[in-house]
Each structure stands twice: as structure tokens, then as C-alpha cells.
Image (tube, coloured by chain):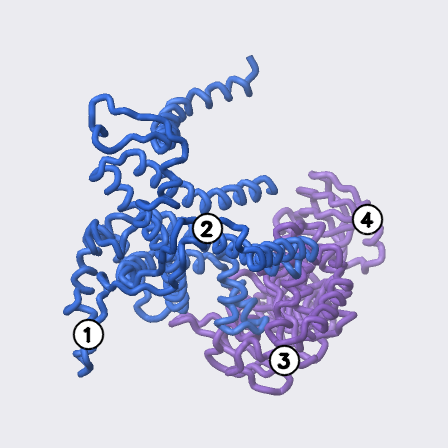
Chain colours: A blue, B purple
């Protein structure tokens, strides 16, 4: 037998146990969840020894997105989207900003770095409890101004019922199409200088989609039978603040490690080339750390999609204003015993996470292929 | 275009003084090479001129202006780094255009300048590539391109060829020289390689332990070193330095090395007195063999035993023992074939011999 093929067999046998385990316990169970989500397992006899499960196709998904009972889930989903966007912007932006400040090597940099990274080491239950106290209606943050002789704040951080950026769920398909159009146009602008033809193609398709929805929006079906408003619930602000507090130290550490990895010569070169400190970060350091930004975005986005314990600790499971699909999935599955609907929620979250991660993996493989 | 002056420039890191009182006057359009062993402070001097390192004492003047407090970007100097320091995420074009963009030049004008520089450096086909897609030599060229697009007053090179293989280094060395002849920009070039220093420089500055040892044209520092360090550092193989005693009897002046008399020519080292100990410096190429011996005076000839020979093709390096005790390295023409163990007639160009004081190692003139 040839040496090479023997090596292959050895490698295969070594990997086999983990392949079997991952196959069964990860992919097998994903498959099982997908199947469960297409049955009607739930309700009265759900906990029977041999529960009745009938295949119902995509009915559970249709109910979640367009059904009367799915309204709570839809608000949770909207919450999750706003939550993810705010967390990404906040934690990446703040982390980057602190990293830049520390990269200027202020006195006590080591101590400051530890202080900023420290929240990472707390569990979400602990930080959730702390922030619940801080954001209590008549305590913590709200009484801060009184120390300066001002009136206390009266904002209900965790129980406010106001919402902004409200939209009608009936329009969700049109809104998504506008989103697609915007993404195409931005992607076109991004390559405008490098590849004119590609840019034109992207711009044209973006404008076409946008124009189509604008002019013939009626053709696009309504997603729901009646008007149903969803928006950015201000009650989630407190949770967003707590999560940014907890994760900006982490992104700071990522960026700081990246900045430290940039050679001194490159800084010197930028300085001689006439870049100010701000110019250096804007044109050299931050673009060079694109892989770090991408990793941070992926890690934070899947954390925010899975967020459970922090919200549980801060507002409990039953606060509709601060609901999250992950909480909803838990409640639907294990409190209401609606296993099929719970599975459908899990799969929706899984697909959303995949839309973040799969493009990243594809681009990574491509890059490796190019090398 | 500018001259650069260093007046008593010193640099201290904490308690360690790495550069001491360097005085140097670099003329407009001159190509100056700072050379010395690693740790001699040559890069620090360059970085102080660039403004990347604070000046602890003394003054740096560019075009007559003291620039100690002027920030690097306002000194109008361009620098090429040993590891190129190209921006890895930018194309070659953007790398070269970056400084123009930072100085607020319009895109069309910048493009024209970059294309012009790319043409000079034969980089035009690579303008769209990223640095990672270029070879070492091409990256080096981009680094130079980045310097020349700016019409900087002074070019600073910090060991720019050290990361290239030997063949490419020779080629780039010639191109650098041509580039300087074409642009005639004041250039300060740091290297530890004495061959680069000899081939590139209008004037060489030899540094050791943060102090200048000698400033002069390549031929000056080669033929007339100020001290034994310069003698050994410049030239490859290095100068032979032997212990000897100065003897004077009647009209005969000799540096006695072992049992041999190395005659001291008329007018050299007139201050020496009989019995003074000296260091005798003889360049390997001042030792002759074969036909070349015939042109030398009789009293400059003797015999030596070949111990080792390294044949390099055009020339050979031989290790020779004279009088059974004095070891010398000789550099002779390649066609002179000598086998180890052979005793051959050799001759010395004693008019090129240099004598050093054994205490201070300074040249006795």
C-alpha cells in the first residue's frame, strides 16, 4: 500500500469518532429540530409517553410570521434585530475608541486595560442583577443627577412602554426589499473606483429593486391580515447598555492586540507620509484590522441572537417589552409545551445566525483558496 | 533639495547614551552613507533626522532651519525602511499616493505623480496589486516610489537592501545610484554593509559606539583610515593589523614585525621615535604575488608560505605566513595559483602601509 493512502486512512480513522459525535449530536439534532418544527407536537398531549406528532409542513413558520398568535414572536424578533444592531455599533465603536485611547500609551495603561476588560469576566446573571439595580426607577442611574443638584430622571429603563421607529408588520416584505436595494447600492458604491462594471451592475440592480417596490409596492403581498405595529422598544435600552458595558472591553482587547501587532515602522511611515494620529487610525490601522472587525461582528451578532440570561436576570421572562426570541423559544417549548412552535423559533434563529456566519466562512475559504 | 547639518547631536535612552555629539555637514544633493557595526547608533541618527526620535542634545538643521521641534511630517523628508513598511491593505498605487492624499493633493494630480514615479521604477504593471502579491525587489521599489512621489527635500534609507538576496541587492544598489544621479536629492543612507557604503556613497561616515570615527570619500577612508577600527571595518577582507616596533638606524626606518623589517616610506610617521611600539596596517590588496611582484622595489620583497587559499574566480584570498610567525591575508589576482604548503615570493606595497598608535589606535601620520 502506498504511504500516502495509508496516511489518509490513519487520518480518517483518527477523525472518525469526532465526526460521528458531531454528526449525531450537532447535525443530527439540528435535523431533528427541523423535523419537529414541521410537526404539530404540542398542546394537551405533548408530554404523553408517545405523543402524537403529525407532519404539518411549514404551518408553524407561517403562523409565527403571519398568524394571529405570532404577534409576540414578531415583536421579539424586531427587538432582537434592533438589539443586535445597537450592540454591534455600541460595543465595536466603544471598544475601538477605548483601544485607540489605550494605544496612545497613557500612564497606567495596564491598569486601565484590566479595568475595561473586567466586566467580561462576570456572568450575565451577575451583571444583569447589578444593572437591574442600577436601572431601577428610583435608584442608580435615575438619581445620578441629584448629586449635581439636578432633578432626578424619571425614565423607566426596563419597563417603558414607548417605542420609536415604528413600522407596520404588513409592510415587512416591502421593507426587506428596500433593505436589499440599499445593500446592493452600498456594495456598488464600495467598488466604484476599483471595478466600474461590477459597481454599475450592483447599482443598477439596487436601483431597480428600489424603484420596483416604490412604484409597484401593491404587487408585493401584505405579510399580515391587519395593521400590526412593531418598533424599537425603549425598554430594551437598559439591556443594550448592560450588554455594551459587558462586551466593549472584549472588543477593546481584540483591537488593542491588533494595534500592538502593527509594526512601529508602519506607524513611522504613516507619520512621515503626513498622516495625523486620527489619519493613521482611519486610513492605516483600522482598515488593516478588518479581519478583527469581522470576527468581532460575527461573535457579537451570534451572542446577541442567543442572548438569554442577561435579559432573564434584568427583566424576568415575562416582560413583553423586552422579549427576545431565545426567551420566547424557552417559554414556548418548556412552559407552554408547544414543542413544534419552539423548534420553529429555534430554526428561525439558526437561519438568521447562518446569514451572518456563512458569508464569512465562504469568503475565508475563498481567500485561502487564492493563497 | 536641501543640506542637512548635525551640530553636537546626542541621544540618551534613560542613562544610556547611544549617540554622542555627532557633528556632520551634509551638502545639497550629496549621497551620504552612515556605516558601522550593529548597535553603533547609525539608525538612531537617521531617526533623529526624520523626527521619529527626540533629540536629547544638539541641533539638526534642514536647509538652514533648526528642526528639533518640527514634527516628522513637516520636515519634508521621506524614508525607506528595511522591511519596506508598505501598507498591506492598500494597492501599490494607493501606497504611493497615500502621502499625497494626506497632504491634500487632488486625485488627478496625485495620479500623474504616481504614474511618473511608477514609470521611473518600472512599477506600472503592478499598480493594482497588493504588496503581498509582489516580490521582495518589487516591494523595495514601491517603498522607494513612495519616497520619490513627494519631491521630498531629503531621502532617508534605513538598511533598505538588507532583506534582499545577494544578487538582487547588487542590482538594486546600482539602480539606487542611478536614481540618485537622476533625481539628485540629498540622500542619507544607513547600512552595516561596507560594500554598499563604498559603492554608493559620495562620502562615508563611519560610526562606532555612537561616535563618528571618520568622514570621507570611499577612497579616502579606504586608503587613509583615521584609526585601526576604520581600517578593519572598511574593506573586505579587512586590513591586516600586526603588532610591531618602530626602529630607526641611520637613514633606515623600519616597523619591525617579528624578524621582518617593514620599511616606512619617507615623510610618513615622522614623529615616531626609535623603540616605539606601533600597530602596522596592510591592506590585503597591497600584498602582491606573481608578475605584479616584479614592479616593486627589491627591498619590499620576501617569501611567504601559503597556508590556505580561497579562489573566488576573479581573485583569490590567501592566508600567508611570513617568517614562520606573521600571518597575513592577501587578496591577489585569480590567475595566481598557489597551493597550501608552497613557499612563494611575495611583495608589499609599503607606500600604502598605515601605522597606528597602539594606545589610542589612531593613525600616526
Check whether the beta carbons of the residues at disc 2 and disc 3 lie within 8 A of each other: no
Q: CA distance from mark 3 to mark 1?
A: 60 Å
Q: Quadrant of residue B170?
A: bottom right
Q: Which residue is mark 1?
A: A144
Q: Which mark identifies residue A47?
A: none
Q: Are marks 2 and 1 on the same chain?
A: yes
Q: Where is B339 relative to A200, above or below?
A: above
Q: Reading the chain from its start, which is encountered first: label 4 or label 3?
A: 3
Q: Which residue is mark 3?
A: B4
Q: Which residue is mark 4?
A: B290
Q: CA distance from mark 2 to mark 1?
A: 46 Å
A254, A39: nearer the viewer? A39
Q: Quadrant of residue B216?
A: bottom right
Task: Look at discs 4 and 3 and give the one toward the viewer.
Answer: 3
Q: Which image quarter is the N terminus of chain A in?
A: top right
Check whether the beta carbons of the residues at disc 2 and disc 1 lie within 8 A of each other: no
Mark 2, Cα crowd under 10 Å, few <14 / some 14-19 / many 20+, is some
* Residue B207 position in % (x across, y down): 57, 68
Q: CA distance from mark 4 to mark 2?
A: 103 Å
B238, B49: nearer the viewer? B49
Q: Quadrant of residue B203?
A: bottom right
Q: Where is B15 relative to A234, above or below?
A: below
B280, B202: nearer the viewer? B202
Give the residue displayed 21% in from the left and 28% down from the top: A45
* Residue A309 position in % (x across, y down): 24, 48
Q: Where is A175 relative to A270, above or below?
A: above
Secondary structure under tag 3 reads strand
Q: Number of marks in the image?
A: 4
Q: Residue furthest left?
A: A138
Q: Which residue is mark 2?
A: A222
Amino acid at each position: 500500500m502506498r504511504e500516502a493512502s495509508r496516511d489518509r486512512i490513519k487520518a480518517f480513522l483518527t477523525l472518525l469518532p469526532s465526526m460521528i459525535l458531531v454528526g449525531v449530536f450537532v447535525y443530527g439534532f439540528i435535523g431533528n429540530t427541523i423535523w419537529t418544527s414541521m410537526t404539530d407536537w404540542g398542546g394537551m398531549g405533548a408530554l404523553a409517553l408517545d405523543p402524537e406528532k403529525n407532519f404539518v409542513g411549514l404551518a408553524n413558520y407561517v403562523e409565527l410570521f403571519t398568524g394571529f398568535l405570532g404577534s409576540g414572536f414578531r415583536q421579539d424578533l424586531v427587538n432582537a434585530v434592533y438589539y443586535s444592531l445597537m450592540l454591534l455599533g455600541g460595543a465595536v465603536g466603544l471598544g475601538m475608541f477605548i483601544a485607540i485611547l489605550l494605544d496612545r500609551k497613557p500612564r497606567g495603561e495596564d491598569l486601565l486595560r484590566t479595568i475595561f476588560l473586567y466586566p467580561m469576566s462576570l456572568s450575565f446573571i451577575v451583571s444583569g442583577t447589578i444593572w437591574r439595580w442600577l436601572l431601577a426607577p428610583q435608584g442608580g442611574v435615575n438619581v445620578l443627577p441629584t448629586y449635581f443638584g439636578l432633578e432626578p430622571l424619571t425614565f423607566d429603563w426596563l419597563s417603558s412602554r414607548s417605542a420609536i421607529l415604528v413600522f407596520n408588520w404588513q409592510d415587512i416584505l416591502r421593507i426587506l426589499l428596500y433593505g436589499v436595494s440599499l445593500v446592493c447600492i452600498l456594495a456598488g458604491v464600495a467598488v466604484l473606483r476599483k471595478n466600474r462594471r461590477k459597481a454599475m451592475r450592483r447599482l443598477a440592480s439596487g436601483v431597480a429593486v428600489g424603484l420596483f417596490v416604490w412604484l409597484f409596492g401593491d404587487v408585493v403581498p401584505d405579510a399580515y391580515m391587519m395593521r400590526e405595529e412593531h418598533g424599537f422598544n425603549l425598554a430594551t435600552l437598559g439591556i443594550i447598555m448592560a450588554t455594551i458595558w459587558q462586551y466593549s472591553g472584549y472588543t477593546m482587547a481584540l483591537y488593542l492586540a491588533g494595534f500592538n501587532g502593527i509594526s512601529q515602522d508602519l506607524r513611522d511611515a504613516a507619520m512621515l507620509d503626513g498622516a495625523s494620529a486620527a489619519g493613521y487610525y482611519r486610513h492605516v490601522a483600522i482598515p488593516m484590522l478588518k479581519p478583527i472587525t469581522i470576527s468581532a461582528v460575527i461573535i457579537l451578532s451570534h451572542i446577541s441572537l442567543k442572548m438569554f440570561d442577561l435579559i432573564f436576570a434584568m427583566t424576568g421572562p415575562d416582560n413583553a417589552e423586552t422579549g427576545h426570541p431565545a426567551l420566547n423559544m424557552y417559554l414556548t417549548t418548556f412552559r407552554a409545551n408547544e414543542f413544534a412552535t419552539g423548534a420553529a423559533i429555534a430554526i428561525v434563529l439558526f437561519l438568521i445566525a447562518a446569514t451572518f456566519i456563512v458569508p464569512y466562512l465562504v469568503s475565508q475559504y475563498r481567500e485561502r483558496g487564492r493563497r | 533639495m536641501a543640506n542637512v547639518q548635525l551640530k553636537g547631536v546626542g541621544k540618551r535612552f534613560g542613562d544610556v547614551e547611544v549617540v554622542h555629539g555627532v557633528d556632520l555637514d551634509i551638502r545639497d544633493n550629496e549621497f551620504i552613507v552612515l556605516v558601522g557595526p550593529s548597535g553603533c547608533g547609525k539608525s538612531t541618527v537617521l531617526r533623529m533626522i526624520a523626527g521619529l526620535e527626540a533629540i536629547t542634545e544638539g541641533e539638526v538643521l534642514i536647509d538652514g532651519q533648526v528642526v528639533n521641534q518640527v514634527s516628522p511630517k513637516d520636515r519634508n523628508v521621506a524614508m525607506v525602511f528595511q522591511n519596506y513598511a508598505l501598507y498591506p491593505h492598500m494597492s501599490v498605487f494607493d501606497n504611493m499616493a497615500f502621502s499625497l492624499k494626506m497632504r491634500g493633493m487632488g486625485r488627478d494630480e496625485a495620479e500623474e505623480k504616481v504614474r511618473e514615479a511608477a514609470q521611473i521604477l518600472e512599477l506600472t504593471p503592478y499598480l493594482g496589486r497588493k504588496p503581498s502579491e509582489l516580490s521582495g525587489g518589487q516591494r523595495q521599489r514601491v517603498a522607494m516610489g513612495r519616497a520619490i512621489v513627494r519631491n521630498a527635500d531629503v531621502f532617508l534609507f534605513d538598511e533598505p537592501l538588507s532583506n534582499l538576496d545577494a544578487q538582487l541587492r547588487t542590482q538594486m544598489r546600482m539602480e539606487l545610484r542611478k536614481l540618485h544621479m537622476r533625481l539628485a536629492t540629498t540622500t542619507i543612507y544607513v547600512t552595516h554593509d561596507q560594500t554598499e557604503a563604498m559603492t554608493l556613497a559620495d562620502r562615508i561616515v563611519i560610526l562606532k559606539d555612537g561616535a563618528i570615527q571618520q568622514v570621507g570619500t570611499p577612497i579616502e577612508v579606504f586608503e587613509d583610515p583615521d584609526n585601526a577600527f576604520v581600517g578593519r571595518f572598511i574593506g573586505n577582507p579587512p586590513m591586516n593589523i600586526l603588532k610591531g616596533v618602530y626602529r630607526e638606524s641611520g637613514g633606515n626606518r623600519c616597523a619591525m614585525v617579528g624578524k621582518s623589517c617593514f620599511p616606512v616610506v619617507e615623510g610618513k610617521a615622522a614623529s615616531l621615535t626609535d623603540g616605539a611600539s606601533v600597530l602596522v596596517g596592510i591592506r590585503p590588496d597591497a600584498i602582491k604575488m606573481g608578475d605584479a611582484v616584479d614592479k616593486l622595489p627589491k627591498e619590499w620583497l620576501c617569501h611567504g608560505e601559503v597556508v590556505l587559499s580561497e579562489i573566488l574566480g576573479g581573485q583569490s584570498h590567501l592566508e600567508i605566513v611570513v617568517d614562520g610567525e606573521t600571518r597575513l591575508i592577501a587578496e591577489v589576482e585569480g590567475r595566481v595559483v598557489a597551493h597550501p604548503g608552497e613557499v612563494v615570493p611575495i611583495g608589499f606595497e609599503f607606500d600604502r602601509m598605515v601605522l597606528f598608535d597602539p594606545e589610542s589606535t589612531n593613525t600616526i601620520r
